[in-house]
Amino acid sequence: MKFRIVAGMCLLLLGLAAPAAQAGQAAADPTSGPPICSSAGTALAGNFHSLTITGNTYVESGTALTVRDNVVLEPGSCLDAFSLGRVLIGGNVTVEKGAIFALGCTPESIGPGPPCDGQSTTDAVGGNITANHAYTMYLDGDSIGGNVVSIGGGPGPTLDPYVNFPIKDNSIFGNLVVEGWQGAWFGALRNAVRGSVVIANNVGVTIGETGLPDSTEVASNTIRGSLICTGNSPKAQLGDSGGTLNLVGGKKRGECRAV
């Protein structure tokens, strides 16, 4: 598995903030990790009832963002919480066309360096995460009370820009569905899923160090329901992730019979 910089496509912030909310401008993203949005945009912290993102925003390490109800990322927007900040969302997250949603950080996100520095966050979403043709998402070490469903999206089957879609080290209390995303690399690694997992019709065009296609890595997950994989290019695989076979309480179907 390879993690490289994503070229985002985003603009400004609109939200209904409680008096405790804080927002400021920054010339560069202080989280010091790989850039997620196309520019740093607006620093976001404090307490919100609900939140609508219409541009580039980030949660700086050492700060906290709490949203009691729902978060909506409008088309082309970006929320970069791939940092050691703390994010708690009580309701649902909706990620619209071309938007980028990055939440959480673990030591295995990209390696021992920034922005995780060998630490793990405890970010949480109480409801569902639903993505409708999102550019990409980064979900690392999160607790998600409902389903994670992503349909379509990505920049297309290209290495330029190089765009990843990692889903790693999460506790998902519903189902995980990723269908029809196209980019450089997609993988679901080390997640605990209480429902079922469906990985279908995704395309990743990265070639690994061994010269073989390096995407659709589905490894080391613990799944109470079934694991269903079909129509992916490349087919679902352990790849070079160093992961192990998935532990599945239900059935392994399609490509995922091999993993």
Image (cartoon, rainbow, N blue to C red):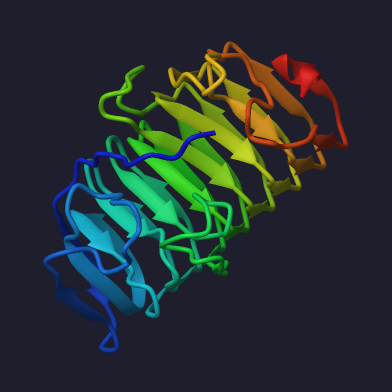
Count every numbered label the image shows and give the total: 0
Q: Position of residue 52 (x, y in %)?
A: 27, 59
Extreme residue toward the front, this view: 210
Q: In this view of the protein, which residue sits in the foreground, 49 or 108?
A: 108
Q: Residue at x 32, y 67 (%)?
A: 31
Left/right placement of residue 225 relative to residue 111 reads right
Q: Residue at x 69, y 46 (%)?
A: 190
Residue 219 higher or lower than 89, as above or below = above
Q: Residue at x 41, y 59 (%)?
A: 82
* Quarter-of-image position of residue 214: top right
Left/right placement of residue 220 relative to residue 47 reads right
Left/right placement of residue 53 relative to residue 176 reads left
Q: Residue at x 52, y 59 (%)?
A: 112
* Quarter-of-image position of residue 47: bottom left
Q: In this view of the protein, which residue sits in the foreground, 109 or 133?
A: 109
Q: In this view of the protein, which residue sits in the foreground, 223 or 165?
A: 165
Q: Position of residue 95 (x, y in %)?
A: 37, 45
Query: Quadrant location of the N terminus?
Result: top right
Extreme residue toward the bottom, this view: 20
Residue 71 higher or lower than 247, as above or below = below
Query: Quadrant location of the C terminus?
Result: top right
Residue 96 higher or lower than 79, as above or below = above
Residue 240 higher or lower than 61, as above or below = above
Q: Position of residue 219 (x, y in %)?
A: 70, 34
Q: Position of residue 61 (x, y in %)?
A: 38, 73
